[in-house]
Amino acid sequence: MMNIEYCSIGDVDKIGASAHYLQLGRYGVLLDTGLDPHNDNPEGVPDYEQIAHRNVHAILISHAHLDHIGSLPVALRYFNRARVYMTPSTADLTEVMLAHALEVQRKKALENWESYQPLYTPEFLEMIRYLFQTFPYEEPFPLHGYEESGIRFTFYDAGHILGSAGILIEFQGKRIFYTGNVRTSAQFILRGARFPDGVDVLITEATYGSDAEAERTKRSQEIDRFARRLSEHIRLGGVILLPVFALGRTQEMLMLIHRLRQRGKIPAVPIFVAGMGLRINRLYDRMLHKIYPQYDRGLLRTITFGRWSRGQRLQGPAILISTSGMLMPNSPSFAFASQLARDARNAIFMVGYADPETPGGLLRAQKREELARLFNVKSLECNVELFRFSAHSHRGELLKMIRRLSPETVIVTHGEPEALQWMASAVQNAMPGTTVVIPRKGQWYTLATLPAAPNAS
């Protein structure tokens, strides 16, 4: 007899370093190799020591956000014989995102006059790029070199960012599906996620599990409110800052603004992009049509008026889309927000997720006095508004997805404790016969016991 076992070696009860290990008999599979976005030191890396004595035959990457790929070079130092699988778009984005993270870490150390020890070097990053094996959506592939295992993988479009994938693992008649980050309904560029037919085990995210308001929000009404408030500040001559993630949110918000301008819903004003988003735009323009043939190549480039750099005088009316999405100190969006804070004509529109402990989280919570101190101003005069345009599914959509997949076991991860608890309770109530697990980091769970299979070397 043999077991299918599961262990989360990364963060579970927060949006951090995602990493999940599956022991499939004698075969080992690692799902994602994330990094805590608030800690790019060794302490922010998943606990690879936990599985260092076990086999890792394959590393599968769901998408290219750093909380899912940030420690991939570290993982490959531990498991240098592992196959590395991802979609073609994720491969290109991973290379860019890891190189950028290294440069950000270097600049931060220089600005703070600190020594630093990077998790990897540019040379190592260039070397591991040749290990990436890519497969398109919905085309099954085996565990190469161990075909006798019978293990088969399939990527499904997760609808989260370009190249994002849910991952189906088939082994000895059992089907395990890992959602990564998932958006079941369409965004402004990406279509909604696609799923396999029924699974035995589901490992799902729960980012918005505790957010009842996100579930109640109607997208059409949110778009109308966004257009109305944007127009008001444009007519006042203000600058509207959208702090965004460079990968995903930048491109989706550019497309929304473009469509609103085409339909006459907002005045025509310059749209500037600052930070890493411009480089990601070029990748979207180059790669997106391969997944969505109807996409107009070069569109994001034509929408954007130009680059706005730190140090330039902010003069409206204009729309400024800038990283980081959580307004982390030393980021372009933090510097711009500090300049805009003093003028009521200006506005900061939060359009995506932000950790509660970050400046972006303080903005979402409207903690204006704390922000004034942070931005070094007497008071926060600019308008601050929250809009719900997330790349994640809300909890109702997640619950619908789980019902459709009808798993025997659901493992709930990637969310704050309240989100995990809500999702676990909702699944248990909706599907009483289902086993629901909120895993603890480092704890092992047996998912199935199967007849013996061929040995792995």
Image (cartoon, helix red, strand yellow):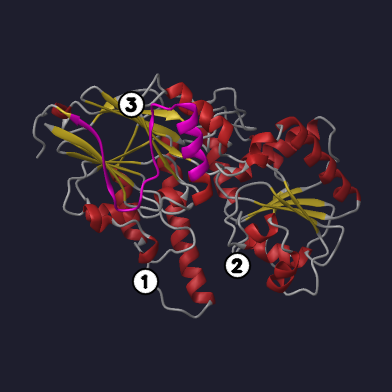
Amino acid type, label 2: Pro
Q: Secondary structure at mark 3?
A: loop
**Badges 3 and 2: C-beta atoms under 8 Å apart?**
no
98 in relation to 368, above or below: above
Report the disc number at residue 261.
Answer: none
Residue that label 3 marks = 200
Q: Is residue 152 left or right of residue 295?
A: left
Residue that label 1 marks = 117
The mark closer to the camera, 2 or 1, is 2
User: Where does residue 104 sit, x and y in percent of width and height?
Assistant: 50, 63
For marks 3 and 1, the one nearer the N-term is 1
Magenta residues, start to end: 421-449
Query: How far apart are labels 3 and 2 at the CA level?
Result: 43 Å
**Badge count:** 3
State the residue at coordinates (49%, 62%).
38
Q: Is residue 131 left or right of residue 393?
A: left
For marks 2 and 1, the one nearer the N-term is 1
Q: Quadrant of the C terminus?
A: top left
Residue that label 2 marks = 329
